[in-house]
Image (cartoon, grey):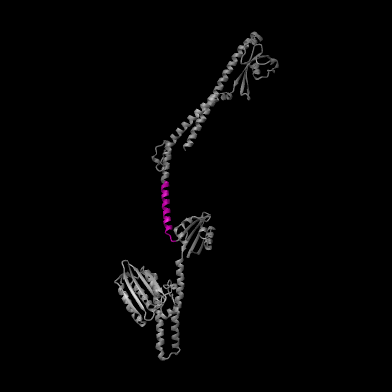
Amino acid sequence: MTRRIFWAIFGVAMVMMLAAIGLVFGMMNAYFSAERRDNLRSQAVFIGAGIQASGFEYLERMPISSERITWIDEDGMVLFDNKANPEKMDNHRAREEVVAAFENGEGFGGRYSKTLSEKTVYYALKLENNTVVRISELTISPVALFFTMTQPLAFILALAIFFSIFLALKTAKKITKPINDIDLEQPELAVVYDELTPLLRRIAVQNKQIYWQMRELKCQKQEFDTITSNMQEGLLVLDAQGDVLSYNIGAMQLMGIETSRAQANVFQLNRSEGFRRSVESALAGVHREETIQIDGKICKIFANPVFQEDTLEGAILLLFDITEQEERERLRREFTANVSHELKTPLTSISGFAEIMKNGMVQGEDVPRFAGKIYDEAQRLIQMIQDIIKLSKLDEKQSIMEKEAVDLEVLVQETVKRLEPIAQKKGITISVVTQPAVFTGVKQVLQEMLYNLCDNAIRYNYENGKVTISMENKEKEIVITVSDSGMGIAPANQSRVFERFYRANESRSKETEGTGLGLSIVKHGAMLHDAKINLTSELGKGTKMKLVFPK
């Protein structure tokens, strides 16, 4: 701004100076022209009087003069010229100043030489004898005069330019300093010219409006960032070319992408066919949904185009992790298939035995045996249905499951007493080492968990084997361990034994007549109580199950 003001002031000063020089030259030229004419007229009158008195004699006696004197007769012939031979001169009757003199008594004329930058001024005076005396004088033109004054004028001009620059700089700084010192954050406090006061007030009002607008935008952005950053779903905002304009942490986590790569073209983030189809459809203005796999996760993509009026501006991609949902759906299908299979086996046995008895193919003494088979299979069905109901309740975490203080030591002792008859039949020895411990939980579920662990330790044990139950009451947790010397579980099956109806060894499971739901109940019970399950097992050497309950 200072520079612009400086050049403006300097330009005005130079224009004014040049105008002044032009005016001076004009006035000088007008003054000298008038002075010259008066001088020529006086000389012409004096010489004319001499000619009328003495004629050629007067002219010949005249001293050498810088002015040119010409005497012309009434026909235009040159009678005398002090600078040239009259006989060789042209007729002057048609000359401008001569014509004016014959008509008006006197006449002025002038002719300019471009080559010499000089001008000859003529004055003609008509005498009483009808002749004309003409006096001419060479004059320097204003341009030539200007060039004769070049050196002093150049010095004066340089001096004027120097002072103009100095004054322009000083004036510009003086003008701009109060403006440059204005605090744009608080313009109303600035001390400036009165002419700027309305502008400063306007700036102050504008600052307040901008402040509140920026504050509102900042709050909106913080709210948006807070919402999107805490979304588990992924969000990608694209422009019309497919470049990523905005994203959230969820999108980067779902797609397994580093933040440094986020500001790139969306096709560089994922090149799978389903993802590409979704983006291309959205950028073509069509909504599309796709299910794709990313790094072992199953994701649902909703691709929506974004229009502003009728122009496609970009697209928004929403990514949902549906891995757990798909896994539940898979488990539901497996559960349905397993339930059908498990129910079919005892029902087939019951139906077969009943059909044999109906057809009278059973002897009287065999009826109790067949009836016992039917009873056992029915009990197995009832047990399976009860386990399924328990699992359903644990899945739903029904509010009726109220927690209470449970003495785990007493619970362990009661469980062992219930299972002692089964253990005695197989000659299995049960040893119990406990410490007093009270835990807040659902007593019925805790009882089922302990029962299923101990029941499995007995069922999948060898004849005359051992089962050890221990409980430790630590500072931050209660640990219950059930170990046996039984068949063990292969490493490949250990991660699946907690699935519903999963059997590590189908033939061995049939021998033990279990429902395949015991460990699944243990797993869901542990989840209900925020407990952890640790499994250690080796084929042929036994299994150790450890429950860790946090206090």
State the residue lying farthest toward the front: 541
Q: Quadrant of the C terminus?
A: bottom left
Q: Is residue 221 above or below residue 453?
A: above
Residue visible at 46% across and 68% down in the picture: 326
Q: Main secondary structure of the magenta part?
A: helix
**Is 311 in front, or is 325?**
325
**Which residue is situated farthest in the left direction here?**
436
Q: Nearer the viewer, residue 504 or 75?
A: 504
Residue at the bottom extreme, as displayed: 364
- Position of residue 129 relative to residue 443, above or below, is above
Q: Position of residue 274 (x, y in %)?
A: 52, 63
Image location of residue 286, percent across then percent down: 53, 60
Quarter assignment of residue 34: top right
Q: Is residue 440 visible?
A: yes
Q: Where is residue 102, by image quadrant?
A: top right
| 483 is within the stretch colored magenta | no
**Residue 474 placement, left or right of 193:** left
Spot occupied by residue 29 in the image (x, y as percentages of width and height): 56, 22
* Magenta highlight on residue 222: yes
Q: Give the extent of the magenta segment.
A: 209-232
x, y (%) of residue 217?
A: 43, 51
Residue 306 visible? no
Q: Is residue 62 left or right of residue 483?
A: right
Foreground of the two, 482 or 26: 482
